């Protein structure tokens, strides 16, 4: 079964849509972004959700103390590091981490696995953006990781391409933001369709 993370959640309504359609996790962006959520709002939403869904906080080159404070305050289950954080930074954090890679060239296992983390997320490198670009990258560049149970595929996924992505990459999870939005806001019908396409693809993946 491929897990689904719906990223860029800003409201309880959108969080509940993700939960009710069967997402494994929501992502809350605390970095500068049009999808940024205030700490107080995330804390309130996450209190309401409890342990019914995994809550992931997304950070970009934030101070370790600030990440730890927000993770505690918002009862985050995982923190996703989407900047140029180092392996030492990860160790200092003492929190389960998803390390994001913006993929520009073929990635080798040794470089990626220097980070002792819960999972690795592969996303598109888009000029001027740290994430949430809505663009895919060449999945061939991560072929050394196909089938690994500690990778999350992101970048431009949507209902039209997620099936092919799962069949090829066989990741632990897929991550989507732009692909389930309409006019810049999360769209429940798109979340539902995306979830259906993931389930459909899972029938072909052992
Ligand atoms: O989504 C953002 O605005 C964002 C900003 C800064 C850092 C990370 C960000 N998003 C992280 C995610 O996990 C996105 O879901 C991932 O980049 C895929 O986004 P999309 O291509 O829009 O599906």
Image (tube, rainbow, N blue to C red):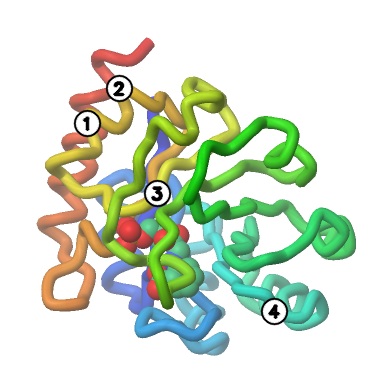
Question: SS of the residue at dot 4?
Answer: loop
**Distance between the Cα atoms at labels 2 and 1?**
6 Å
Determine which of the numbered discs, if any, sits on residue 163 in the image. Answer: 1
Q: Which residue is mark 4?
A: 62
Q: Earlier in the sequence, mark 2 or mark 3?
A: 3
Are there few (<14), some (14-19), or many (20+) residues within 10 Å of tag 1? many
190 with respect to 206 (left or right) = left
Considering every residue shown, the one lying at the far front of the view is 105
State the separation of the CA atoms marked 1 and 4: 34 Å
Determine the residue positioned at 77% across, 58% down: 95
Q: Earlier in the sequence, mark 2 or mark 4?
A: 4
Q: Is residue 158 above or below residue 148?
A: below
Q: CB of residue at label 1: within 8 Å of ligand 1? A: no
Identify the mark nearer the N-term, 1 or 4: 4
Are dots 2 and 1 in contact, CB under 8 Å? Answer: yes
Estimate the x, y position of residue 41 in percent, counting from the top left. 47, 85
Residue 108's x, y, as percent? 64, 33
Q: Can residue 28 be spotted in the picture? A: no
Instruction: Give the labeled residue for mark 3.
Output: 154
Are the two marked residues, 2 and 4, in contact with CB atoms closer than 8 angstroms?
Answer: no
């Amino acid at each position: 079964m491929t897990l689904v993370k719906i990223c860029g959640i800003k409201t309880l309504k959108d969080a509940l849509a993700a939960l009710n359609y069967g997402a494994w996790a929501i992502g809350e962006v605390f970095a500068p972004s049009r999808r940024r959520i205030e700490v107080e709002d995330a804390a309130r939403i996450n209190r309401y959700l409890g342990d019914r869904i995994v809550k992931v906080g997304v950070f970009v080159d934030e101070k370790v103390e600030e990440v730890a404070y927000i993770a505690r305050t918002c009862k985050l289950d995982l923190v996703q590091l989407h900047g140029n954080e180092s392996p030492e930074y990860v160790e200092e954090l003492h929190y389960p981490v998803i390390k994001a890679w913006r993929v520009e060239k073929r990635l080798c296992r040794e470089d990626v696995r220097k980070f002792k983390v819960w999972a690795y997320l592969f996303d598109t490198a888009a000029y001027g953006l740290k994430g949430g670009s809505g663009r895919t990258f060449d999945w061939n560049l991560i072929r050394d990781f196909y089938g690994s149970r500690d990778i999350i595929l992101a970048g431009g996924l949507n209902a039209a391409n997620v099936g092919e992505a799962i069949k090829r990459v066989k990741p632990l999870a897929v991550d989507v933001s732009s692909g389930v939005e309409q006019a810049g806001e999360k769209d429940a019908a798109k979340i539902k369709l995306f979830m259906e396409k993931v389930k459909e693809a899972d029938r072909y993946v052992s």
